[in-house]
Amino acid sequence: MTGPLQDPIATDALIIGAGPAGLFQVFELGLLEISAHVVDALPYAGGQCIETYPDKPIYDIPGIMACTGRELTERLVRQMSPFAPTLHLSQEVSSIQTQDDGRFKVETSRGTAFLAKTIFVAAGIGAFQPKRLRVEGIEALEDEQLFYRATDAFKSQAAGRHVLVIGGDDAAVDWAVRLADDTAGDNPQRPASVTLMHRRDVFQGPADSLDRMRQLVADGALQLVIGQLTGFDAAQGQLTAVHLVDPEGAVTQLRADSLLVLQGVSPRLGPVADWGLALERKQVVVDTEKFSTSTPGIFAVGDINTYPGKKKLILSSFHECALAAFGAAKIIFPDRQTPLQYTTTSPRLHRMLGVHAPAASE
Amino acid sequence: MTGPLQDPIATDALIIGAGPAGLFQVFELGLLEISAHVVDALPYAGGQCIETYPDKPIYDIPGIMACTGRELTERLVRQMSPFAPTLHLSQEVSSIQTQDDGRFKVETSRGTAFLAKTIFVAAGIGAFQPKRLRVEGIEALEDEQLFYRATDAFKSQAAGRHVLVIGGDDAAVDWAVRLADDTAGDNPQRPASVTLMHRRDVFQGPADSLDRMRQLVADGALQLVIGQLTGFDAAQGQLTAVHLVDPEGAVTQLRADSLLVLQGVSPRLGPVADWGLALERKQVVVDTEKFSTSTPGIFAVGDINTYPGKKKLILSSFHECALAAFGAAKIIFPDRQTPLQYTTTSPRLHRMLGVHAPAASE
């Protein structure tokens, strides 16, 4: 997925990960007048909070009785907004190289490049990646006839095709329903047919969405197939059909020339392991003074780091972000002392936060 | 002010200080099934948040765009409420002694005594104490005719007396107004006269309160004196008059047999310095693994502690409380592993927090 390299973006701080730690890192850096770019593998901010418990309440964020992962993300995005970071989403950092001038050259899977004075690894349990099909050779079809997200590219190639949606949760059911609805309408991008396939006849999702899916199946607008993909046929590099095995072990073939695979995401530590940082049980080792890794200038905050006493708590990551920001300030402003100023009393911070008079409570 | 000693209260954890750190310490201990008693010198919870910026917004509590010191206190009190700690207010810890069984015997200025397995020093910048008069010998009148809080004892002795209120802020103005209003009514406890004294003719407080004060002065129901106390007269141990010097240097005498001094509070590190804990520039030295002091079993969290990288941030104290709670669990439950459980997913924590089903967001 490496695209053409663009001119590198020069930045004081590059944050890897847009989960709660990465978002609050933007805020803490902003208070010290350090602006940041943020890279995340997901197409939206929130990290584990959004991917693993978007609608479940968290009870141990200090001062907040209960908030869901989604609400916490929204709160942190709003809190950091005065510092207007640039988010580079749907891409992973693929390499980090130290330059002669002490800066780090960072490249992502989409060809975005940075020259960063400091790096904050806030990568949680790794980059969330769609769970991919394990069928030999099928990766050659990716971004052509095989998609792991319902992107615009997927939608435009689906027109007139026999689409197979693979997966059993909300997203798979929801997209199967939408596409099947399209086949009945006048949408110029409508598929020729839509099939939903899952390894068991058990689907997750809101009741009305499941009801609608069953109705479309009853009406013949959506095919439902229970089975697992074992292979595929291609002619001149073009997908024409898939092979599948049903729960009884019978092998069949299914016409399909467009695949939308929505089997959830799983975190992948990925290239973090290759950046030369000291690791301990796959966690990045940091000090507790400034949460620096073994490479000066690279900090690690949140669930990815480890130190004596470490607990993987969101509230601990907030503390780590604050101290890491002060650590970075020493590198970015080597000739300046960075005193601790309080948001309650500092007119300078009030200007930066856009709060000129005492603000109303949220 | 040492009262008679009561039977010691046995407790797993004693928290010294009911500011944000002390309040969140209750919560973090509660999650690990450790119940706590809390001691504070102030008559209410909140510490510096309440004493120094009750109505000013704080902008760097993670996930909370803005909240005043008072609001943060209310939020933390509500959050810890499932764990129902006992608060012992208006008293300071005066001594800590290690017992043969490893527990700590703790006594307060009001004679409350504890036998605690662990102690959490969350004393901030010290115990907030009313600013006292600096007039030789006047301390002998304290709690008889001289009061630093408008307690019930003050109110009952004020009946029929010439009351002098000293101070220039809200509290002093407010109490001068209330007492002067009383002199006009039928209240059996009404003073014979009320005088408000401040070193300058500048008073702080809500406009309506200041207006009311000036009106009472104009009506002759309240005397206003600008000056500073320099001495006093007593006959047979009873206060009869005070001496004061006005801004021009003239010395006068004023009849007064009851003093209410409301000159604000100031923090006093006080006996913390005498507990034998390792200190560095008047801060308690802790490790960053469990925020233990040099005495095993005594932890220190919040503004009172120090370690490499320490910043006096409320958000750092939250992290310190969490790790200190795990440190204490090892002492309180020596035979038990204490795994990290998440409030988002643990049914056990849900029961303890009283949230049986996913709760609505606050």
Image: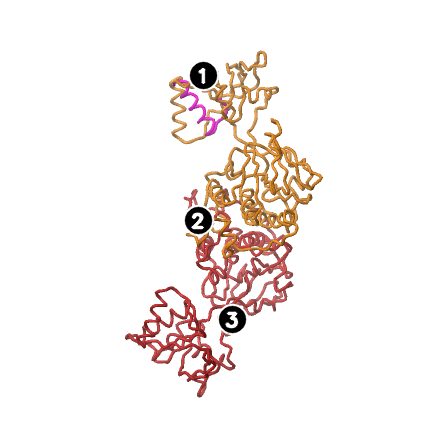
Chain colours: A red, B orange
Query: Chain letter of disc 2?
Result: A
User: Would residue B179 appear left or right of A300 to someone viewing this image?
Assistant: left
In this rendering, the answer to whether B85 lies above or below A321 is above
The mark closer to the camera, 3 or 2, is: 3
Q: Compare residues A187 and A264 and report the one nearer the observer.
A: A264
The mark closer to the camera, 1 or 3, is: 1
The answer to whether residue A199 is visible is yes
Q: Residues within 10 Å of mark 2 (few under 14, many from 20)?
A: few
Would you name the residue on which mark 3 appears?
A109
Element under label 1?
strand
Instruction: Please report the residue visible at 59 percent of the width from the left and 22 percent of the height from the top.
Output: B139
Q: Compare residues A11 and B335 and report the one nearer the observer.
A: B335
Q: Are marks 1 and 3 in contact (CB under 8 Å)?
A: no
Residue type, mark 1 in image: Ser
Magenta region includes residue B197? no
Checking the image for residue A354, the label placed there is 2
Instruction: Please report the residue visible at 60 percent of the width from the left and 53 percent of the height from the top.
Output: B338
Element under label 2?
loop
Cα–Cα gap, marks 1 and 3: 81 Å
**What span is colored magenta in the figure?**
B165-185
Question: Could you tell me which quadrant the N terminus of chain B lies in?
Answer: top right
Q: Residue furthest bottom?
A: A236
Checking the image for residue B343, the label placed there is none
Mark closest to the chain's N terminus, 3 or 2: 3
